[in-house]
Image (cartoon, rainbow, N blue to C red):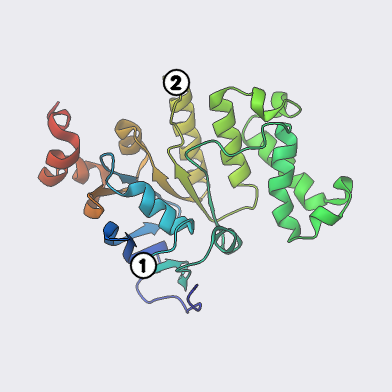
Amino acid sequence: MMQELETPVAGQADALLSVSDLTVRFGSLVAVNKVSFEAGRGKITSLIGPNGAGKSTLFNLVSGAITPSAGVVRFDGRVLTGAGPKQMLAAGLARSFQITNLFFELSVRENLRLASQFLERGRGLLRPIASSRAALQRVDELVEQFNLGKKTEELAGFLSHGEQRRLEIAVALASRPRMLLLDEPTQGMSHTDTQETGAMIRRLAADSLTILLVEHDVDLVMSLSDHVVVMHQGQKLYEGTPQDVRRNPAVQSAYFGDAAHA
């Protein structure tokens, strides 16, 4: 059950997201064990770690996809522990998925319009499309922002993989969230698409959007991030700036290995 909302906690003025001692158990397995970190407003915070480190599970705990066994999730000072994805979205936190989550049989414009109906606060689905002014205006903004003008009437299923991922991020931003959670946004992308996605993430952060990123491409993470949290065996191993993370001996041993010294 979701905990009651609280007033902002002193000392967290610069943190939009605050995670304290977050834990989840699946039977006897402790998948995430007492993890704490903060994500600064308008900053890019990344979760990294070897396969099986617990970063995706932690991401799902933060986004509301999984209910924690213990610990607290605060967003903008409010306790949202146990809130589901819809409650998180209403609070201003949106996410993308590791596997593309679009309506492939609908056009790019229709995918964006359906996501933008959130701005009508439940009223838009009962109105003629033409009268949903806020939603239609948001669609036009996203089409321009994500350079989708030549693709608006194309079915989402016919887009390239890179274009689908770009559309999915646009869909996640349709509700004007204050924080975006990105789960492996460059998975399966070519080098060129990866670089373009990285540039897009930088632009989003430059517009004061707070971003929490789970990403396997270490070089991309280190070039994008303001703060990096390293996971290992379900626990936080270390956190700091990209430079500090690369230099940390425990991180080098557990994650980077010989590559850290290359």
- Residue 99 in the image: state x and y as whole percent: 50, 37
Horizontally, residue 240 falls left or right of residue 62, namely left
Q: Residue at x 64, y 52 (%)?
A: 175
- The residue to which callout 2 is attached is 190
* Label number found at residue 55: none
Q: Amino acid at mark 1?
A: Ser
> Is label 1 or label 2 in front?
1
**What amino acid is found at the position of numbered circle 2 in the picture?**
Ser
Residue 149 spot, x, y in % from top left: 71, 28
Q: Please name the residue that numbered disc 1 is placed on.
A: 69
Comparing 252 with 199, the one in front is 252
Secondary structure found at label 2: loop
Disc 2: CA contacts within 10 A as few (<14), some (14-19) or many (>=20):
few
Q: Residues within 10 Å of mark 1 (few under 14, many from 20)?
A: some
Return the x and y of residue 237 as percentages of the image width and height. 20, 52
Residue closer to the observer: 101 or 160 = 101
Q: Looking at the rendering, in which quadrant would you find the C terminus?
A: top left
Identify the residue shown where x is 45% and y is 69%: 81
Which of 65 and 138 lies nearest the eye of the viewer?
65
**Distance CA(mark 1)–CA(mark 2):** 38 Å
Q: Is residue 74 left or right of residue 219?
A: right
Classify residue 148 by image quadrant. top right
- Let me know if residue 147 appears in the view: yes
